Amino acid sequence: MPISDPKRDALQHQVNAKIKWNAEEDEVLAWLSQRHFIRGTDADEMIAIARRHRARIIRERSLYGMIISAVTALVSGAMSLGYLNGGVWFFRSNIVMLALCAFSAVWFTRYLTRFLSGRSVIAE
């Protein structure tokens, strides 16, 4: 196992941050080449590590969002069904619960696609 170089580790953290905040790979490659004279396979390896790092962060945050939206959808759906099965029809509150359930289901699918793909349009 090779001994890690502190300067290379710090540089890898900077590359991770650039990729995390949606910098273009060509821009990061040019930055590595011009500022730090890192080219070729070393630069490609650093970019690949940064992409995996970003995907891991996106998946982790998407998992939290999936949990929150699933719980919200289940609770609001159960409350809406409880209104219907109990024979009590509060029109306004039932519509609100159904809308909340639908909204949470949409957000759950959004987080699920982000979790499965590991990609996000916005910076994480």
Image (tube, rainbow, N blue to C red):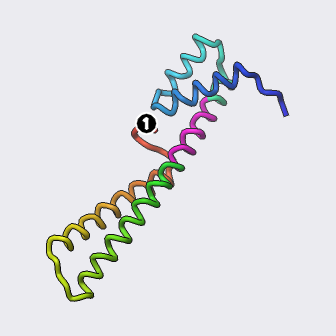
Read off the magenta span.
Answer: 47-59
Outermost residue to the left: 91
Instruction: Pinpoint residue 97: horizontal percent, then vertical percent.
Output: 25, 69
- Residue at the spot x=25%, y=87% of the render? 86
Outermost residue to the right: 1
Assess whether residue 3 is covered by the magenta stretch: no
Instruction: Pinpoint residue 76: horizontal percent, then vertical percent.
Output: 32, 70
Could you classify mark 1 by the number of other residues whose Cα lies within 10 Å: few (under 14), some (14-19), or many (20 or more)? Answer: few
Could you tell me the amino acid type at mark 1? Ala
Residue at the disc numbered 1: 123
| Vertical order, 45 against 36 (above or below) | below
| Vertical order, 52 against 77 (above or below) | above
Instruction: Pinpoint residue 52: horizontal percent, then vertical percent.
Output: 60, 40
Q: Secondary structure at mark 1?
A: loop
| Vertical order, 36 against 106 (above or below) | above
Q: Give the total number of marks visible in the rendering.
A: 1
Assess whether residue 48 is covered by the magenta stretch: yes
- Residue at the spot x=59%, y=39% of the render? 53
- Residue at the spot x=16%, y=77% of the render? 90
In the image, taking residue 4 as reference, residue 82 lies left or right, namely: left
Tell me which corner region of the image, top left, top right, bottom left or bottom right, holds residue 75. bottom left
In the image, taking residue 65 as reference, residue 49 lies left or right, namely: right
Instruction: Pinpoint residue 33: horizontal percent, then vertical percent.
Output: 60, 14
Tell me which corner region of the image, top left, top right, bottom left or bottom right, holds residue 31. top right
State the residue in front, 3 or 26: 3
Quarter of the image for the N terminus: give it: top right
